[in-house]
Image (tube, rainbow, N blue to C red):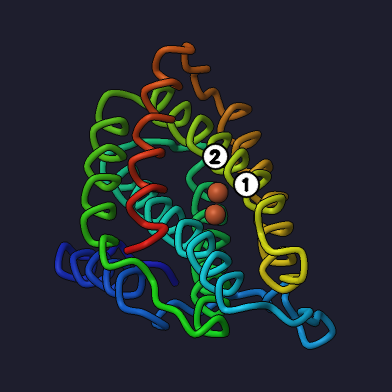
């Protein structure tokens, strides 16, 4: 039997999402990590390990932003027909979050200290886009996913050659993100004009530059 969530239930649920996203190791994946026992790294130097961790930290923060974006959008967007699909996509983002977190731990490194800031910013953008309208909000998801896909391709090339475990994670993420972008467009998302995409890529450059080290 389903029941309508009361306001308090809803508030607790929202708060739970924030904690699971921002507290390290709190996210639980629903699918096993693509970096399973059968995937082995080759030996890496300290410098290579630090570089791999910097890239994985960026990907982890990207997933923090995705959680916040879906959550903010969920508060304000109507999305009657696609709500189920969007929730499925949000669950896949939790997998990505947990996989990147696990990988950072394997690399003996930490998630970004700037995550609360990026969470808040993405939450706000998601909520505003959702309030303006579903077409814009789905378009925002599609454009974000495309951007994330570009990052992933770039990172797969830039990872140390011996880092097969990070690469396995990014490969599956890239498949999922392309699917999310396609879902959002098929659901009626607006295709964003080039200047908006350019603005988004400037913002993501600020994120990647700061999070690589912090
Ligand atoms: Fe993701
Ligand atoms: Fe995604």
Say if 119 sits above or below 76 in the image: below
Q: Is residue 34 left or right of residue 7?
A: right
Mark pair 2, 1: CA separation = 6 Å
**Residue at left 29%, top 61%?**
115
The mark total stands at 2
Measuring from the top left, give residue 186's x and y in whole percent.
Answer: 63, 27
Q: Residue at 37% across / 29% down in the picture?
A: 202
Q: Is mark 2 within 8 Å of ligand 2?
A: yes
> Which image quadrant for residue 1?
bottom left
Tags 2 and 1 in contact by the CB under 8 Å rule? Answer: yes
Element under label 1?
helix
Query: Percent position (x, y) of residue 136?
Result: 39, 23
Establish if 25 lies above or below 171: below
CA neighbours of label 2 inside 10 A, class few (<14), some (14 to 19), many (20+)? many
Q: Is mark 1 within 8 Å of ligand 2?
A: yes
Which residue is nearer to you in this view: 135 or 60? 60
Residue that label 2 marks: 145
Residue to which mark 1 is pinned: 177
């Amino acid at each position: 039997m389903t029941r309508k969530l009361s306001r308090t239930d809803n508030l607790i649920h929202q708060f739970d999402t924030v904690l699971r996203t921002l507290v390290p190791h709190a996210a639980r994946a629903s699918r096993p990590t693509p970096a399973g026992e059968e995937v082995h790294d080759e030996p890496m130097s300290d410098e290579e390990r630090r570089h791999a961790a910097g890239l994985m930290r960026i990907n982890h923060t990207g997933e923090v932003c995705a959680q916040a974006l879906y959550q903010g959008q969920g508060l304000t967007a109507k999305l009657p027909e696609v709500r189920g699909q969007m929730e499925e996509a949000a669950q896949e983002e939790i997998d990505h979050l947990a996989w990147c977190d696990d990988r950072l731990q394997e690399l003996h490194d930490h998630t970004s200290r700037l995550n609360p800031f990026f969470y808040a910013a993405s939450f706000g953008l998601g909520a505003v886009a959702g309030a303006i309208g579903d077409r814009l909000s789905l378009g925002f998801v599609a454009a974000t996913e495309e951007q994330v896909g570009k990052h992933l391709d770039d990172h797969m090339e830039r990872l140390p050659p011996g880092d097969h475990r990070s690469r396995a994670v990014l490969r599956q993420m890239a498949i999922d993100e392309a699917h999310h972008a396609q879902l959002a467009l098929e659901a009626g998302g607006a295709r964003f004009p080039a200047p908006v995409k350019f603005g988004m890529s400037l913002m993501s450059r600020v994120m990647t530059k700061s999070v690589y080290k912090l």
